[in-house]
Image (tube, rainbow, N blue to C red):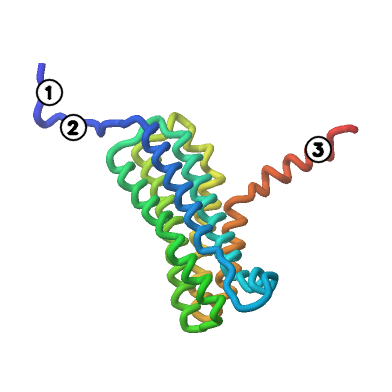
């Protein structure tokens, strides 16, 4: 018997496997692109050229850790999904769009720091910070949408409470660092590095393992 025309239709829940495979590939590709900007430039001895490339190494490290943090949160979310819907897939594409864009401002700030151009540093570091903030906001938005539409498996969403708090603190810290970068670009880059380390390193879990190790009788 056909359904009544006014009967509300539930959104179609889609399998998440293809989305996870595609997303992992994009994260890996974006991380790989970062290394293309690493290079040594004459003049000088080989050692001088390598040491002079420190802005590129710093930018690479910050961006790689940031992509890693976004991938960790994305993996934690998708592992706990019971399925996806059409809007979730499109929001996920927006997140991947921002992640793949990150190598571009990464190269810009490396060049600006290397040339010691204050005006370029301000512009490019601000652009870089806005990209990092966008990635963090889109990741949080993806999680919020999954919770609102009950896409997580029963009670599985509660396991994301700690990563969710970390992500929110990261958003606030990025906003503050962007403002600092308007006056002190290099300090802002250092803050971005600190945020990336905070988002990637599981300090609480590491401390728990160390406490357990020290409390175990030898």
Q: Residue at x 36, y 44 (%)?
A: 145
How far is the residue under mark 1 from the one under mark 2? 10 Å
SS type, badge 2: loop
Say which of 29 and 199 sits in front: 29
Classify 10 Å Cα crowding around label 3: few (below 14), some (14-19), many (20 and above). few
Identity of the residue drawn at 88% across and 32% down: 217
x, y percent for residue 154: 44, 29
Residue 53 or 127: which is nearer the viewer? 53
Question: CA–CA distance between discs 3 and 2?
Answer: 56 Å
N-terminal of the two: label 3 or label 2?
2
x and y, in percent, of residue 43 in the image: 61, 78
Q: Which residue is mark 1?
A: 3
Marks 3 and 1, how far apart at CA: 61 Å
In the depicted structure, whether residue 177 falls above or below residue 215: below
Q: Nearer the viewer, mark 3 or mark 1?
A: 3
Left or right: 73 as drawn, with respect to 10: right
* Residue that protrudes farthest toward the top in the picture: 1
The single residue placed furthest to the right in the displayed view is: 218
Write down the quadrant of residue 2 in the picture. top left
Query: Which residue is denoted by mark 3 in the rendering?
Result: 213
Location of the C terminus (image quadrant): top right
| Residue lying at 81% horizontally and 38% vertically, measured from the top left | 213
């Amino acid at each position: 018997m056909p359904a009544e025309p006014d009967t509300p239709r539930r959104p179609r829940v889609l399998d998440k496997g293809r989305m996870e495979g595609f997303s992992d590939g994009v994260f890996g590709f974006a991380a790989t692109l970062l290394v293309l900007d690493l290079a040594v430039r004459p003049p000088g001895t080989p050692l001088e050229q390598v040491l002079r490339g420190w802005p590129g190494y710093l930018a690479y490290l910050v961006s790689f850790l940031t992509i890693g943090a976004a991938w960790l949160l994305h993996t934690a979310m998708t592992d706990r999904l019971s399925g996806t819907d059409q809007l979730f897939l499109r929001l996920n594409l927006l997140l991947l769009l921002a992640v793949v864009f990150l190598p571009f401002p990464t190269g810009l700030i490396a060049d600006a720091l290397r040339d010691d151009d204050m005006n370029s540093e301000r512009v490019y570091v601000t652009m870089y910070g806005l990209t990092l903030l966008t990635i963090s906001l889109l990741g949080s938005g993806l999680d919020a949408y999954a919770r609102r539409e009950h896409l997580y498996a029963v009670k599985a969403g509660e396991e994301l409470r700690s990563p969710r708090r970390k992500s929110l603190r990261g958003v606030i810290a990025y906003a503050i660092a962007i403002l600092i970068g308007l006056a002190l670009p290099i300090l802002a880059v250092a803050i971005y590095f600190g945020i990336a380390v905070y988002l990637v390193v599981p300090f609480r879990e590491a401390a728990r393992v160390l406490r357990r190790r020290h409390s175990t009788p030898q």
